[in-house]
Image (cartoon, grey):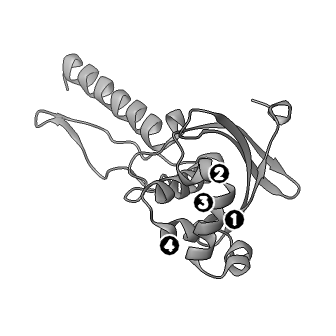
């Protein structure tokens, strides 16, 4: 293999890895097309920069932090798309049993958490593992552009991370 071809492959592989990590591991707080790609899977089994330059494709595997953020983002996207049934699938079994139906759950979110129902922007802040489980702090903007701070409590299940609670935070409660 020529040096030029080797350098081209390295550059393209680096660019693909950079884009993949930033797109699918939660850059800017949002996941791209989360309904079709889960961050714990290989992004692609093969890729080519051109027919002349095959590219090494690296599997991008997320850790618990990225998986938790993907769960929260998935629910945000479901609410934005008006799909309360899908949003309800991100809730833990205790939340699901508390509300009974996706429609009851959606009505509660719309009434009590309008900034989650129709978020205008999301930034992930501190992610912590505690003796009670994991938490993810979120800065979320409502339609008027006002920032709200929430703490998501999540629990790990055989089918992935589920949201088990949300708490409003004061700005003084936030650690970045």
**Residue at 31% across / 39% down in the picture?**
56
Q: Secondary structure at mark 2?
A: helix
Circle 1 residues within 10 Å: few <14, some 14–19, many ≥20 = some
Considering the image in quadrants, where does the C terminus appear? Answer: top right
Q: Is residue 36 above or below residue 100?
A: above
Q: Are marks 4 and 3 in contact (CB under 8 Å)?
A: no
Between the C-alphas of marks 3 and 1, the distance is 25 Å
Q: Which mark is residue 8?
A: none
Q: Secondary structure at mark 1?
A: strand
Circle 3 residues within 10 Å: few <14, some 14–19, many ≥20 = some
Q: Which residue is mark 4?
A: 85
Q: Which residue is mark 2?
A: 64
Q: Quadrant of residue 29?
A: top right
Q: Which residue is mark 1?
A: 156
Which callout, 1 or 2, points at the residue further toward the start of the chain? 2
> Where does residue 57 sit, x and y in percent of width and height?
34, 42
Foreground disc of the pair 4, 2: 4
Between the C-alphas of marks 3 and 2, the distance is 28 Å
Observer-nearest residue: 134 or 21? Answer: 134
Q: Residue furthest left?
A: 51
**Residue at 68% across / 70% down in the picture?**
92
Between the C-alphas of marks 4 and 2, the distance is 24 Å
């Amino acid at each position: 293999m020529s040096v030029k071809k080797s350098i081209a492959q390295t550059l393209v592989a680096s660019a693909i890895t950079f884009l993949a990590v930033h797109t699918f591991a939660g850059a800017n707080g949002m996941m791209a097309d989360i309904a079709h790609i889960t961050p714990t899977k290989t992004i692609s089994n093969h890729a080519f920069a051109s027919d002349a330059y095959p590219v090494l494709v690296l599997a991008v595997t997320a850790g618990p932090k990225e998986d938790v953020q993907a769960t929260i983002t998935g629910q945000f996207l479901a609410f934005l798309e008006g799909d309360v049934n899908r949003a309800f699938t991100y809730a833990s079994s205790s939340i699901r049993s508390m509300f009974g139906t996706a429609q009851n759950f959606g009505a509660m979110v719309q009434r009590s958490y309008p900034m989650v129902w129709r978020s205008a922007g999301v930034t992930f802040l501190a992610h912590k593992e505690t003796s009670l489980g994991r938490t993810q702090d979120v800065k979320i903007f409502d339609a008027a552009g006002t920032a709200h701070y929430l703490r998501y409590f999540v629990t790990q299940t055989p089918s992935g991370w589920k949201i088990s609670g949300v708490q409003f935070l004061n700005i003084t409660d936030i650690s970045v």
